[in-house]
Amino acid sequence: MTSDKVVSSVTPGGRRTILGEALPLATPFLIQIFPVYGCNFRCGYCLHALPREQHGYISEETFMDIHLYKKCINDLAGFKNKLKMLRFAGIGEPLLHKNIAAMVSYAKSKGIAESIDIVTNGVLLNEELSLALINAGLDKLRISIQGVSEAGYKKLANVNMNFANFINNLHFFYKQKRNTKVYIKIIDCALTNEMERERFFDIFGEVSDTIAIEHLTPTVQGIDYTTLAGANPLNITQNGSYMLETSICPQPFYMIQINPDGAIVPCCSMAYPGVFGNASEQSIPNIWHGEKLSRFRRLMLAGVENAGRCCNCSLYKYGVFPEDILDPYVQRLKSLY
């Protein structure tokens, strides 16, 4: 395994724009489609490790309706520019959606994003689905690994799986892919020793274009991350860098998430600060430029502690990059929102 495949300090989406200089955005950089509020895993660090009644509001629907989805994509064609990324992710497993390949294909046909990505645990990949995603034009497949053996998956994800079959399916995808880039990652708490780290790179280096060990971040209230982390530190970001000092979450300024029920939320948090519209009833560009979201951004410019439920959120601290820091731009931005 050569070191040039290891990612430690660059986001999987590529080099970032200096956000404070680019705002306000006529078109969001990222829109996250959250197609399935459900998962085939119960990873110990994830919201799905908790009973459903402890989740709070996430979505009124489990699966996004395909007609609603197409309406969303049609809306996105109304933005001035292409998105930098349309990402299928959220609190669930996107490959559980029976129409996932058709959803990718429809978005590609409309040309609404520079890159279309899926974040998945990958276990549902088989030859048929792999070919469907490849033929649909998927740009990037991000696969979250939960162990380097069946026992490892059982311990962390609480799932029984055929590890050899999983690896065979990844080899099939990698061999058949054309323009799709494969990014494979694992959280450090899934690897208990140096032998397992080496095994991770040996197994998955052959089926990835980029590979990384990411760091566990304590982002869900009610989960004991100290025990999960073991000897691994919890005061560094997901990509392994030191946490940066900032009082402003940048996510509402460059992205939105569309939930399975059409609700529009301004971030990837698991405890939303609010719902800012619904794609089934409103135009997504109108929501992006609307007063409700602008008002929320103005509150955020006064600091996370002033932005409602955001005062209890630590997610942004673990995902912020130097280019995202907005504190030096506050006065200019207050005049623009």
Image (spheres, rainbow, N blue to C red):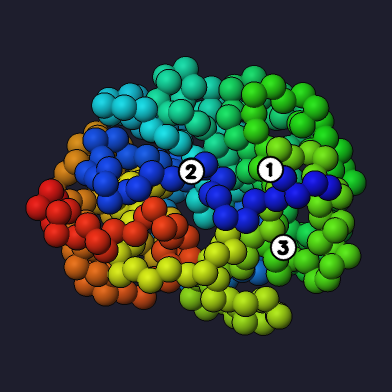
**Where does the image place residue 63, in percent across and percent down from the top left?**
50, 43
Q: Residue at x 17, y 53 (%)?
A: 333
In the image, is 41 to the left or to the right of 278? right
Q: Is residue 135 left or right of residue 117?
A: right
Three-letter code for the amino acid on which mark 3 is drawn = Ala
Res 238 → quadrant: bottom right
Q: Which is in the foreground here, disc 1 or disc 2?
A: 2
Q: Disc 3 versus disc 2: distance between alpha carbons?
A: 31 Å
Which residue lies under the disc numbered 1? Answer: 210
Report how many numbered discs are placed on residues in the image. Answer: 3
Residue in the picture at 46% in, 28% down: 114
The residue carrying mark 3 is 157
Q: Which residue is mark 2?
A: 15
First along the sequence among labels 3 and 2: 2
Q: Quadrant of residue 151?
A: bottom right
Distance from disc 1 to disc 3, alpha carbons, whole Å, reads 23 Å
- Within 10 angstroms of label 3, few (less than 14), some, or many (20 or more) residues? many
- Identify whether 201 is placed above or below 208: below
Which of disc 2 and disc 1 is earlier in sequence? Answer: 2
Q: Picture coordinates of residue 45 (x, y %)?
A: 61, 68
Residue 227, above or below 265 = below
Residue 185 in picture, x, y percent from top left: 68, 52
Q: In this picture, is 51 found above or below 61?
A: below
